[in-house]
Amino acid sequence: MVPLILDFVACARAAGLRVSTGEVLDCLGQAGRIDPLDESQFFSLLRANMAKSRLEQERFDRIYHLYFHELQREIEDPSVSIAAQTEEIDAQVRAMAPRDPIAGAIADFLGGDPTAYLHLLRQIDGEGDSGRRGPGANLGSLVRRLPVLTALDQARTILADYLAAHRRQIHWEARRQIDRHIRQRLDSARRLLTEPERHAVSAQGIRRKPPENPDRLGERTFSGLSPAEVDQMRQVVARLVRKLKDAVGLRHAARSRGLLDVKKTLRRAARYQGVPLELRHRRRPPRKARLMVLCDLSGSVWSAARFMLNMIYAFQDCFDRVRSFVFVAGLVEVTGLFDHHDIDRAIAKVLTETDLEYGAATDYGLTLRQFRSACMDAVNRKTTVIVIGDGRSNYGNPEEGIVAEIRDRCRRLIWLNPESEAFWYTGDSEMRTYMPLCNEVRPCQNLNQLSDFIRDLVL
């Protein structure tokens, strides 16, 4: 079992999962305490030692499923041996470009070792931080993937030619097994290359908790709501706010009791002949975080942003301080409007009384530069920074260095994107640049996703 675990560790590291030598030793030391034939125990052992955060847990699940399920899938008829034929096909794939690492990585993947291929994909993803900006800058990811797509198509052609050339030498059942076996692995390789990594559901099929509002209104995107549904949504939001505020109040009541005060307890025990019948605790106010919210008010985001701002400000008493900023092509602080007006009136004033150019092209780089100049000193380890936006900067400089600086100074940096995940890597979207720099990135298209986020934020 030790070689199997070490091979999987190499595969996980190639895919970008941080696994230290100490974690590997802990895993090997604990392996003798489980039943290795029980997959649930084996999976829990590896996951507990190698995945340290929610993001790493989801990435681990994806790698585990690939290594132990997709690449270890047995053929339909074990009595039909196809080992020699598959090795010959792997050799032909490797020989189509002997000095090309892409061909070698694909051949290893077809042979059941995904390490080189995952490392290749990681290199492709890591080469996107070039300084060139402007129209077409986001096409770099597609261009870097084209040689791999071409090599996968060539491998599929080699498979078809091999089966056609050996039509008489190989039995038809063996040919069918070979074709299905190689094609399944080629499909897995293509899927890893073309589909972005999803952070909502792991590859093991672990489901998230059910949403707060499982009805059709909770699943409707904010941009698709009719005026009547908007009014109905406000009522649902009000009920949800009341329910979560009750939960927050109970949590703070329990935590405000504080630690045991030994001196006061002993003094109170004097009236009971030294028996501490009444325990005294150190009263302390609940520790509250500070929020800074940066909200994109461009037309593509506003339909969702108004609901997000509405719910965040409904929980102002759950935080020590909430500062709000809105931006399109520049940043404006609107904290005073929300402090002196109710939420609906404040949102109306944001749209009518601020100096934003709503018709201008969104510029995240300019917004971040202005935020660093005016507000960076106020960001500290008690501050949670929430950015609400689709990350589309019209091919401008995304200023990822400022995002990294904010992340290093604040408690948490959270990005809420109201756009569908399928479009995060297309056109002028810079989400591919911003995602690795944030502590958490969430899609937030409907009320169910928004309520899940608010619950995790305040509870």
Image (cartoon, rainbow, N blue to C red):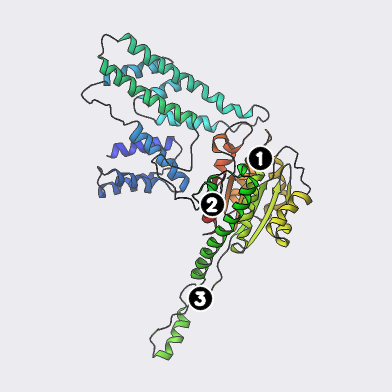
Which amino acid is tagged 1? Ser
Quote the CA–CA distance across marks 1 and 3.
50 Å
Mark 3 touches mark 2? (CB < 8 Å): no
Q: Is residue 57 above or below residue 285?
A: above
Q: Is residue 105 above or below residue 368?
A: above
SS at mark 3? loop
Mark 2: few/some/many CA within 10 Å (<14, 14-19, 20+)? some
**Residue for point 68% across, 34% down:** 394
Question: In x, y percent, where is residue 378?
Answer: 67, 56
Residue 282, which numbered label?
A: 3
Kindly report which numbered mark, 1 or 3, lies closer to the viewer in this rendering: 1
Residue 300, which numbered label?
A: 1
Asked if residue 381 shows in the view, the reply is: no
Question: In x, y percent, where is residue 102?
Answer: 45, 22
Asked if residue 261 shows in the view, the reply is: yes
Which amino acid is tagged 3? Arg
Question: Residue under circle 2?
Answer: 453
